[in-house]
Image (cartoon, grey):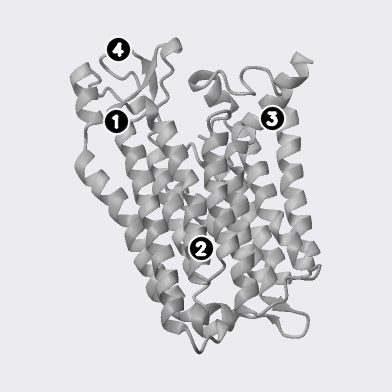
Amino acid sequence: MRAANGRARAWLEIMRISNLPTVVSTAIAGGAIGATVAARDTTVVDPAMWSLAAPPLAYIGGMILNDAFDARIDAVERPARPIPSGRIAPGHAYAAGFACLGLALACAAATGSIDAFLLAVLLVAIVVTYDAIHARARAVVLLLGASRALACLLPMVAFARDADEGTHWASLARGAAPVLPAILALWTVGLSIAARGEVIAVPAAGLWPCVRCRHAMHDSADTCPECGADNSSTARIRWANRGRSWHMWIITVVPLLLAVVVHQLVVPAAIAVSGATGSTVSMTASRQLAIFGIGLAIAVLATWARHRMAEDQRLTPFAVGVWIACLPLLDAMTLAAFGAWRLAGLCIGCTALTLIAQRRIAGS
């Protein structure tokens, strides 16, 4: 029984299952926006609902393959990961990862939307490309941003379609629907850049990341064997405190700027799409309050996480996990602009669920 529980936990770890609610939130937000813009009836069973399963499956497959491709690196830097520790065989990981990606394509095909299926193909291609080359190129963080945007666009396009006219691309553009995928991509790229400096050090293993190249080195060494950089205690303290103040300012201000973008671009378009006539002023005020309230919550969470990371660089994975958990709040902010209050609340719940799950299964 204990062995079975250990194998189950290994699979949950390799899937980074704690972050899955953020992808579910993104898919729901995209589908809801697409349905609203296209005035689609969501009270009946609809093939477009298959699109909601495609991004989570692509995420799970991508996470599994990420560990499969990184098995040799993890054997040195993260020996406790499921594959290096022997809890999951590499062949099983490859099989499960590609199976999940295949299921994601099947779900996209089941929607009956050619555009949604093509987006799914692009998403899968980006996921595999990232997993294969991410350790060799810094620019691949752009692929992560693109994959998060596609996780939103895929269900959005599937729901913004009918059998007669196809995808309502013009309606999506007028409804400012592309704003959310762009915001999600921007946030994902930002946290991914921070995550590339994620602390490799495991105190029990006596390792520490080089302040310049991030190569794993012995904690007692003063010079990196890879790049020759100074890694004395003074250099590490200087590196840990680098740019602390302006980093804090950026993390605090960016969510509020995103709230301004959503308010200025999405709210007017959403009200126009809904055809509101009477209580437009009160409607705008309530949406404005919700948007900036959520933006403030993101700013507080993100700044707190950055503060913890600045105090101790070994808490970088924790900070990255918190920033990942903020993604559903961005979904909620945009859904609030459309007046989809229940779904916005669901997305906020996804943030809470992610933070709780990350206490059991590491999200980064």
Could you tell me the amino acid type at mark 2? Answer: Pro
- The one nearer the camera, 46 or 197, is 46
Could you tell me the amino acid type at mark 3? Answer: Trp
* Left or right, residue 194 beside residue 76: left
Asked if the residue at tag 3 contacts the one at tag 2, i.e. Cβ–Cβ closer than 8 Å, the answer is no
Could you tell me the amino acid type at mark 4? Answer: Ala
Residue 20, given in percent of the width and then of the height, sits at 61, 44
Residue 222, given in percent of the width and then of the height, sits at 25, 14
Location of residue 128 with respect to 64 vertically, above or below: below
Q: Residue at x 37, y 34 (%)?
A: 197
Q: Residue at x 45, y 74 (%)?
A: 266
Q: Residue at x 59, y 37 (%)?
A: 18
C-alpha separation, residue under disc 2 versus residue under disc 3? 29 Å
Residue 362, given in percent of the width and then of the height, sits at 54, 30
**Comparing marks 1 and 3, which lies closer to the viewer?**
3
- Whichever of labels 3 and 4 marks the residue nearer the N terminus, that label is 3
C-alpha separation, residue under disc 1 versus residue under disc 3? 33 Å
Q: Within 10 Å of the Cα at label 2, are there few (<14), some (14-19), or many (20+) other Cα atoms?
A: many
C-alpha separation, residue under disc 2 versus residue under disc 4? 44 Å
